[in-house]
Image (cartoon, coloured by chain):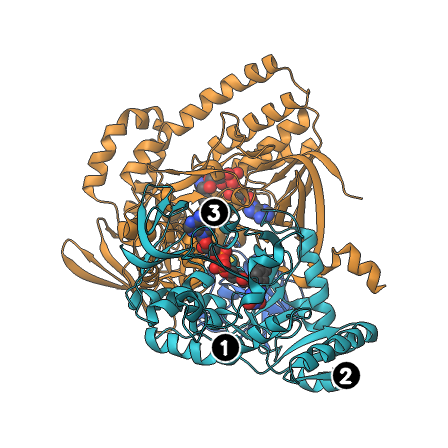
Amino acid sequence: MLMKRDLAIIGAGPAGMAAAALAAELGLSVTVLDEQPRAGGQIYRDVDRASPARGTILGADYTDGRRLTEELRRSGVDHITSAVVWAIEDAFRISYTREGRGAQVEADRVLLATGALERPMPIPGWTLPGVMTAGAGQILLKQSGVAARGSVLVGAGPLLYLIAAQMVRAGTPPAAMIETQTLGDMIRALRHVGGALRGWPYMAKGLKMLAEIKRAKVPRYTGATQIAVEGEGKAEAVTFTHNGRKQRIPCETVFLHHGVVPNTQAARSLGVSHIWDAPQAAFAPVLDAWGESDAAGVFIAGDGAGIGGAKAAEYAGQLAALKIAAETNRLSTQDRDRKAAPLRRALAGELAVRPFLDAAYPPFDAALTPADSTVICRCEEVTAGDIRSYAKLGCLGPNQTKAFGRAGMGPCQGRYCGLTVTALLADANGQSADETGYYRIRPPLKPVTLSELAAMDETTQDAAE
Amino acid sequence: METDYAIIGGGVVGLSVAWGLLRRGRTVTVLDGDDGSFRASRGNFGLVWVQSKGMNQPRYAQWSQQSAAIWADFAQEVSGNTGKSIPLEQNGGYDFHFSEETLEETVAKYEILKAQLGGDYPYEVLGHNALRKEEPHIGPKVVGAILHYQDGHANPLKLLVALAADVRRMGGRVLTGKTVTEVTKPDGFRITCADGTTVTSGKVVLSAGLGAAQLGPKMGFKAPVRPQRGQVLITEKLPKLINRPSLIARQVDEGGIQIGATNEEVGLDDRVTQPGLSGLAAKAIAAYPALARAQLVRSWGALRILSPDGLPIYQESPDMPGAYLVTCHSGITLAAAHARLLPDWLEGTDAAPDLEVFSETRFTVS
Amino acid sequence: MKPASPFLELESAPRVDVTWDGTALSLPEGANLAAALLAAGVKVFRHTPVSGAPRAPFCMMGACFDCLIEIDGVTRQACMLEVTEGMAITRPQEMGAHANET
Ligand SMILES: Cc1cc2nc3c(=O)[nH]c(=O)nc-3n(C[C@H](O)[C@H](O)[C@H](O)COP(=O)(O)OP(=O)(O)OC[C@H]3O[C@@H](n4cnc5c(N)ncnc54)[C@H](O)[C@@H]3O)c2cc1C
Ligand SMILES: Cc1cc2nc3c(=O)[nH]c(=O)nc-3n(C[C@H](O)[C@H](O)[C@H](O)COP(=O)(O)OP(=O)(O)OC[C@H]3O[C@@H](n4cnc5c(N)ncnc54)[C@H](O)[C@@H]3O)c2cc1C
Ligand code: FES
């Protein structure tokens, strides 16, 4: 017999945890599933296990996550850990894998709180061992207390500075920061300075991190171009052009980052409509003011709905919980709106700084539409030039290039090539990102063994006995 | 007239026909749908298959055999022209049986067909032990298999991309993102697309897969095609595990094991379902127990294009002479026949194959 | 001797014995397996089945599948596993051309 819940939440980051705690408080039966062994999501990864020393390195914004993990625990919500969700079907039956066994949960509504992925940054050499995302570098710190010595950080964005500052505090400052934003980007960003001032605490934190990086004497190269990772079989150096001069910095570890983008896999598998968000240069699901999508009963909150950061994720999760509680008669619409008002104000405050950040730290152009020889699909090793050649054969969208050249067919299921393929095709065909579209995402959202699948097969099981 | 032939639908059927016509020096314009259209050509199982086809219509078995026989040569020509490989293996294929009864029943039917084909039906029955010598990973539940030597498998996506490239190389005009909404014949043919594009042509081939169900009747065809869903699984890339293909599983040239396919009458719904995936996984493990540990990486659903009797339809329009309906349920198997043999029928030459049994007159209700 | 690793363990934890491609390693119990292997000096986790190119963890969050390893005949993501006593970890038996290089 399957458990039937009012609400199933996929993801135990700030959005999922906050939504679960509030929904439970309002009387809903809730199951939270997350593939990680402990609650926290990306920002608060493993926060309950982190030693005090680690807490100091990672900062108060990290340890603040204990407030949410504690609320989740206290709420008594059923939190299934290490549960990899691979299919969501039929309003709603959720299939997941836990410790090598398939299982299912049923719920009337789902909240997708699956967060963000780092924006793919295909530059020459990005597949070499030793090249990781900056977020991966941070996860090593958060989850394992492991820090890279003499690494080089490449890219742009506030998260890059946060990670650099955390590495400084860990006693392993980066050997260099190779930054792609330019002075022109900053000047354009000043148009949004009004919003930036409303988001002043963030600006102040940013300046503090920059000061920490400066004190540690980490060399910074801004406006870098022609960035590549060199090495035979592993990363050995980063090369780039800075102020017209070629530079080469030897290193074994390279951390790439030029922003985070919504992880839309689960939403797309449910047929939720997505549109291109130009300032964020990514697809985002189409949602109402409560986070409900155009697929009935499917809600989305947190960075998976559009990048807003951890606090915004928390408020959005709560807004979704309010609407669901009202729909299931746990709450009057008046109470719903009354409780929502302060959340909306806080959310607007959180989002105020975004236009400034998006403009000041745009993605690295050369990694959005890379040179022909650069591998863009890590799994199937398809190059940018391959995609351009399929455009010449008439491919208008990513589903056609997938059939022609396998980009997006590997185990990552397009997570690290999807946006690049859309950008390359849009560019080659002179179409918009919306016209070009995205991969059709199907179950399994993550690979699953055939034995797990077969064990869920009722008909042949009986026949075989 | 802009072009000798307008081909509506740029799947494997349309492109094979276009290729054959271009090779004969005809000018061709292919009109194909958008990124979201239903496309059997990129969701199929890749078998170049003879056994079990045409059990009730020997001419279909023969037509499949003809195509299989010239497939390698056709693929070689296309890949030679384009430098794009089209992996193909024609070392035979299996029909596995989990009970002696079904095996015997099938063999009895094959014997009848074999007689009708004048003995040209090279197959062999392998018991479990003989099969194990050929396929060391076969499971104990498989009691035996029919090994048919004319069967094989190809990489259907590489066929598609190579055909698309070669059609362009030969000067074919391919317009993508065009949904044809109307075909009229004031003088020559005039084809109108949803976005307002028009093309004029001397002849028209309707090879739009399921799209023929809507367009066909407007052009004087019955076009009684319906969708039938097949769900297909593919595993991570594995070391060699399977030698010859079967209807249950095959190992593709890139290393993944492809497992298929369901047969579901669910209309225009091409989703995959957990019960569908589970059923296929269970069957594959019964055939090859080692697959239990393999990771399923990807799955998809695609819609077969089925006529009421499962046979192809080749029909010239009675209302609009010069318009032809070409559709089938095994477009990979028949790709070589469509490219090399069908053009003679479209052109009405003496070498035209006899396709009378595939005309729409068979759907007339008496 | 332990191969040199650019990755430094900031904290010490009780260790357990595991094997990596037949060689004995001692890793922190309960640690993330990918992190522990990196800190132990493992540089290449697998070779791609397409070109045989070497790969190692990239995302550490279960999204990229570059950290694939094999345990009990099943391909798994090292970044999604925790170290347990006696784990026998090998490079995945994919059809990569150079599956035995270090
Ligand atoms: C690597 C990384 C590091 C980051 N670090 C910071 C930081 O230090 N500071 C900061 O302010 N912001 C950081 N961010 C931005 C981050 O997106 C937000 O701050 C915040 O974590 C978003 O919260 P969320 O609840 O939307 O999603 P997340 O916190 O990302 O939580 C999503 C959860 O969903 C789970 N999940 C996803 N798919 C599945 C599935 N199929 N089955 C089961 N579970 C699934 C994941 O395991 C994850 O725990 C980081 C982002 C990334 C990608
Ligand atoms: C699961 C499955 C497994 C299969 N396995 C095999 C196998 O092993 N061996 C084998 O031989 N066959 C197999 N088949 C069948 C084979 O795939 C089909 O016979 C073949 O792909 C049909 O090709 P097509 O070009 O007719 O159709 P499609 O590939 O569907 O192409 C039709 C094209 O027409 C276009 N179109 C539609 N309407 C319009 C319009 N109005 N205007 C313009 N363009 C239009 C569409 O965009 C589309 O590209 C399988 C099919 C399925 C579903
Ligand atoms: S490192 Fe990306 S999935 Fe493990």
Q: CA distance from mark 2 to mark 3?
A: 49 Å
Task: Give the distance between the C-alpha atoms of the residues marked 3 and 1, in whole angstroms.
Answer: 34 Å
The residue tagged 1 is: B88
Which chain is mark 2 on?
A: B
- Which chain does tag 1 point to? B
Element type at mark 2: strand
Residue lying at 73% horizontally and 84% vertically, measured from the top left:
B126
Do tag 3 and tag 1 residues touch (Cβ < 8 Å)? no
Q: Mark 2 or mark 3: which comes first in sequence?
A: 2
- The residue that disc 2 covers is B127
Q: Nearer the viewer, residue A266 or C53?
A: A266
Q: Quadrant of the N terminus of chain B?
A: bottom left
CA–CA distance between discs 2 and 1?
Answer: 27 Å
**Residue A63, horizontal then vertical, whole percent:** 52, 39
Identify the colour of chain B in the image.
cyan
**B236 sits left or right of A449 in the view:** left
Q: Residues within 10 Å of mark 1 (few under 14, many from 20)?
A: many
Q: Where is residue B61 shown, x and y percent of the image?
A: 61, 73
State which chain is coloured orange.
A
